[in-house]
Image: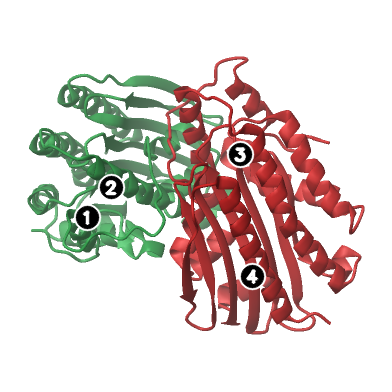
Chain colours: A green, B red
Amino acid sequence: MITKEQIADAYKQLQDEICIGLEQADGQGKFQEELWERDGGGGGRTRIMQNGSILEKAGVNFSAVYGQLPDAVKKTFAVEQNDFFATGVSIVIHPNHPWIPIIHMNIRYFEMSDEIRWFGGGIDLTPHYVIPEDAKFFHQSLQNVCDHFNANFYSKFKTWADDYFYIKHRHETRGIGGIFYDRLNPETAGIGWEEIFEFSKSLGRSFLPIYSSLIQNNRNRDYSEEQKLWQFQRRSRYAEFNLVYDAGTKFGLETNGRIESILMSLPPQANWVYDFKATPNSEEEKTLQFLKKGISWI
Amino acid sequence: MITKEQIADAYKQLQDEICIGLEQADGQGKFQEELWERDGGGGGRTRIMQNGSILEKAGVNFSAVYGQLPDAVKKTFAVEQNDFFATGVSIVIHPNHPWIPIIHMNIRYFEMSDEIRWFGGGIDLTPHYVIPEDAKFFHQSLQNVCDHFNANFYSKFKTWADDYFYIKHRHETRGIGGIFYDRLNPETAGIGWEEIFEFSKSLGRSFLPIYSSLIQNNRNRDYSEEQKLWQFQRRSRYAEFNLVYDAGTKFGLETNGRIESILMSLPPQANWVYDFKATPNSEEEKTLQFLKKGISWI
């Protein structure tokens, strides 16, 4: 029987591995750590890199919190109990290079009782410019992780990501999606607790090789001032999604979480240009055409 | 008896006057007009200036829309009727100069029937650096407009603005407030419809001289690269408020309004720096200390 301590320990170790790997991939930037405690129980390790050679702003956060669930959240979860425990690793990376994508990962575990507990998480990619081969590689890597546990996971969680990372008011997806899942337990997953835990760790371990490849593929690519401006505009859409729709951000703001850890996901610089229209057949227009639900990348 | 056509005409004229005056104050930039129609009734005139000599991004928008109210909005307004009419002028200006403040104005009229109709609006200021004399001048100007109509307006509407323009998760006000009012009718205002209409126009006409003064007071002031970065950080708070809390923005996003007109309020460039701490006794720290509710500027 896996315990919550085991899960938190595994996540903490994963945070360590990913930070070391990202520092190596960046070659210059270092993570700064902030330890924080939560009124009511638990705390976290926020690790931020700013102005690396590639990673302009990167957050790799671990937290394990417990205590009494606020009433609003109890309502959302449709639970009666009060005691909860939640642990997870959250990553958002804004690279300084317009051809290297923004990436987001989250793996988490939530528990209220033996009956009410689940895993959630996912990895999704937000390229400033969509590169089809990279998109295919990304989705294929996620499918490989999924297929090892359940042949249905990838297609189910890929659709879930398409639906979740959608900027309704822009009629566009945040990026090219990836996988997203929530409330995974033996009943919903069709596999046992141990295997679900393995799936969560396996997804976490896939992050570093995937993102390192995407950095390597594109870091030596030249870019223009115009492409840099396009990057800032795409980041403004990222900010819109996170502030208007993202459930984790909303949860954090409403429950008075550590604001700098919650909003580390926001870009170092974002530009809003009035009524921008991409030039027909430009790279920008091609990218916009890829920001749709339901594209099969594999 | 004033009609909705009269109100819309007055607002339209005000939009014209303000755009001409802002072009003069800027000395270089020109407004670009976009006419749009709304599915279901009405439309608007969006006017945007980008990259003026001072006004980096300015929107002065007029709209007059009518039709059937969406169910969600009926619920919010606690009304049974379907037909509505709404008209207003909305302004947001992001100057390129860190010592010139961001300003916002809105005047609006909403009507469903002879019983259900009201005026709303306000002007509020978001200085990147709070300059106490300017803040005093600003509030005094608003009080002068208010006092002409009702001796209670200023203090009531000033408190309302403090409460409304509050960034809860940052524990700070968006700026130094101003006035904000809603659902003004003879019962709530203590004055007749004609006078409420005059108040709305009077507030609208006060915008240009107020903002022109604030531009003139500060346009020749030198500033450093660091102060420019601080401006971008303050703008990120502005974006947070508008995307997370602003009722008008939320209403626009939920009712599928013209997205570029709704989000013209977002800054041309905003920066999010992780866990920024102002240097003790710096201008930045002084400004942060002014971002509180309940400061009496007059």
Alpha carbon of mark 3 to alpha carbon of mark 4: how far?
A: 25 Å
- Residue topped by disc 3: B101
Camera-near label (4 vs 1) is 4
- Residue topped by disc 1: A284
Quarter containing the N terminus of chain B? bottom right
**Amino acid residing under circle 3:** Pro
Q: Residue at x 59, y 61 (%)?
A: B248
Q: Mark 4 lies on which chain?
A: B
Q: How crowded is mark 1: few (under 14 residues within 10 Å), some or many (20 or more)?
A: some
User: First in sequence: mark 1 or mark 2?
Assistant: 2
> Is disc 3 on the same chain as disc 1?
no
**Amino acid residing under circle 2:** Trp
Q: Residue at x 53, y 35 (%)?
A: B97
Q: In the image, residue A254 lies at what x, y percent?
A: 55, 46
- Residue topped by disc 2: A230
Alpha carbon of mark 1 to alpha carbon of mark 3: how far?
A: 33 Å
Q: How crowded is mark 3: few (under 14 residues within 10 Å), some or many (20 or more)?
A: many
User: First in sequence: mark 3 or mark 4?
Assistant: 4
Quarter containing the C terminus of chain B? top right
Alpha carbon of mark 4 to alpha carbon of mark 2: how far?
A: 35 Å
